[in-house]
Amino acid sequence: MALWGDHLRRTFRIVDLSKDVEGKAKEVCDLLNDCFPAGNARDAAGATPDQMAFVLTLAKLSEEETQDFFDVITCAGGLSSQQAHHLINRLKRKAP
């Protein structure tokens, strides 16, 4: 995934833009509210297709929610590998 802007700006933007969506897409975006830069290459690398697929699988988003999620992260400047890693860990802990 292509990125623009720094890690913190993207994170704050995703959380801010999530106010415009509802349901699970908003919940997933809001999980980034405690995602801070790791200080390594994952902050600057875009999320991989495998990471994105895993996030969507764990989140169990509907087709509409998936579109809302992608709209938010695209408008915010993309999702970094670090942000995807954070979402995966948070969603794993949340899973029953």
Image (tube, rainbow, N blue to C red):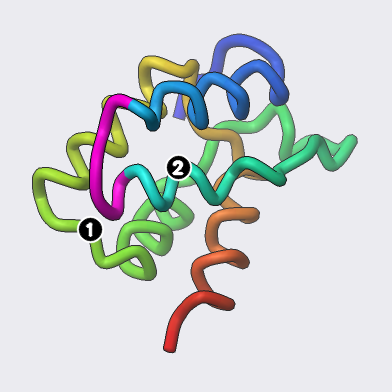
94 up-or-down from 80: above or below: below
Residue 18: name its quadrant. Answer: top left
Instruction: Name the residue tied to disc 1.
Output: 61
Q: Nearer the viewer, residue 72 or 5?
A: 72
Answer few, some or many: residues within 10 Å of disc 1's Cα (few below 14, many 20 plus, some between 14 and 19). Answer: some
Write the residue at 45% across / 30% down: 1
Write the residue at 50% across / 44% down: 30
Distance Cα–Cα, label 1 vs label 2: 12 Å
Q: Secondary structure at mark 2?
A: helix
Question: Was residue 89 drawn as part of the magenta stretch in this picture?
Answer: no
Find the residue positioned furthest to the bottom.
Answer: 96
Say which amino acid is labelled 1.
Leu
Q: Which secondary structure is most common in the magenta stretch?
A: helix
Answer few, some or many: residues within 10 Å of disc 2's Cα (few below 14, many 20 plus, some between 14 and 19). Answer: many
48 up-or-down from 1: above or below: below
- Expressed as whole percent of the image width and height from the top left, the position of residue 15 reads 51, 31
Write the residue at 58% across / 77% down: 93
Write the residue at 35% across / 64% down: 59
- Expressed as whole percent of the image width and height from the top left, the position of residue 14 reads 49, 27
Q: Secondary structure at mark 1?
A: loop
Say which amino acid is labelled 2.
Cys
Q: Nearer the viewer, residue 41 or 85?
A: 85
Tell me: 58 left or right of 93.
left
- Expressed as whole percent of the image width and height from the top left, the position of residue 29 reads 45, 42
Instruction: Name the residue tied to disc 2.
Output: 29
Q: Which residues are magenta?
A: 20-25
